[in-house]
Amino acid sequence: MKCRQIKNLLPSYQEGALALRAKKAVEAHLAACPDCRRLLRFLKETDAALADFPEVEVSRGLMRKLYAVPRLKAEPRPGLLGFFPKLIRQPAFLPLAAVLLAMVIFVTNPHRDAVLKTLNRQVHLGFNTVEKVYAQAGSLLDKLNSYKEDALVSLKRINPLEKNGDK
Amino acid sequence: MLVDSYSRKIFNMAFQFTGSHPEAEDLTQEIFMKVYNSLGKFNTDKNFTAWLLTLAKNHLIDEYRRTKWEKRNRDDFEEALEREPGRGGGVEESAVQEENRKVLWQGLNRLPSEIRMAIILKELQGKKYDEVAEVLHLPLGTVKSRINRGKLMLAKILQERKEA
């Protein structure tokens, strides 16, 4: 067997977990290969060092936190309710909430047809008023234009330069 | 109580895996939160310790993949020893053994996470092969192969360091 194959067998050989035939093959190779013998020595040192590896004590602070875990679990988890305070702080929250509330009141109102009719009438009245104002504004503009033309004609008449035919 | 029985085991597993004391404390808390949240899902016919260790292992490996601890240094080995009460008093440690432990402690970071976890469970936590297989949900042969590979890698790290 080649070194690479033998090296892969060394941990099992070290544990005494190899079948007799494989064990003999490894031993024959080890007798002739200083590299693999050296690796086996380090493998033994690794096993010895890992065998009695120190364990660390849990600090009192951590123990206190761990004892508190079941209590934390019993408290309400920050789900939708935990998100609510953040939502309230949003600038768009109040206008949106007002619109939503108005919609809810409207939808749940038993006289909503009457309300809708009144609303419709008010909207039409408002629209008519706007139209009237617009028409009045148009006639006012026409009047102003005619005043402007009259004023220009009058000015031309009284212009002394134009009257004397100044060259 | 659950905390009394398992805190030391879980904390040491987290510390050996991450090599960082504060990181291990945070992870231990997170693992216990998960344990308490998942207790309802535990099948009472199964081995509770294996179930708990599997949950811990999954959390540690998930966090490792998310944050890549391998890029960070592990805590100093002496610092880790200082935290263990009574050590260095009655126990006579050979200087070679102690030096080897320091090298291997740092060397653990060079193992891929799955192999590192198998080595921790088998060699540092003292589990048997079949117990490791149960925790990792892997066939026995795969577990043995991972542990053998891990040991070889650690032995080569030790050799590199000593022959450098």
Image: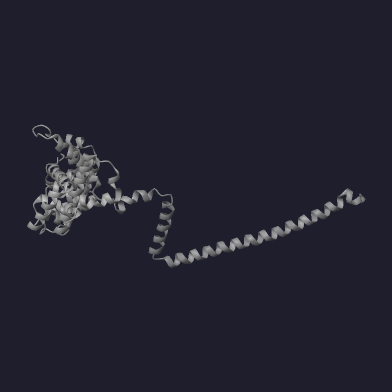
Looking at the image, what colour scheme do you see? one colour
* Res B47 seen here: no
- Judge from the rendering whether residue A12 lies leftward or rightward of residue A87; answer left or right: left
Nearer to the camera, B54 or A4: A4
Nearer to the camera, A32 or A86: A32
Image: B32 above or below A109: above
Q: Quadrant of the N terminus of chain A?
A: bottom left
- Rendering coords of residue B107 (x, y %): 22, 44
* Res A10 seen here: yes
- Rendering coords of residue B128 (x, y %): 10, 52
Question: Number of numbered discs present?
Answer: 0
Q: Which of the 4 quarters of the picture holds residue A138?
A: bottom right
- Rendering coords of residue B95 (x, y %): 15, 34
> In this view, which residue lies farthest toward the front?
A32
- Judge from the rendering whether residue B35 lies leftward or rightward of residue B71; answer left or right: left
- Rendering coords of residue B92 (x, y %): 9, 34
Give the residue displayed 90% in from the left and 51% down from the top: A163
Image: A61 above or below B135: above
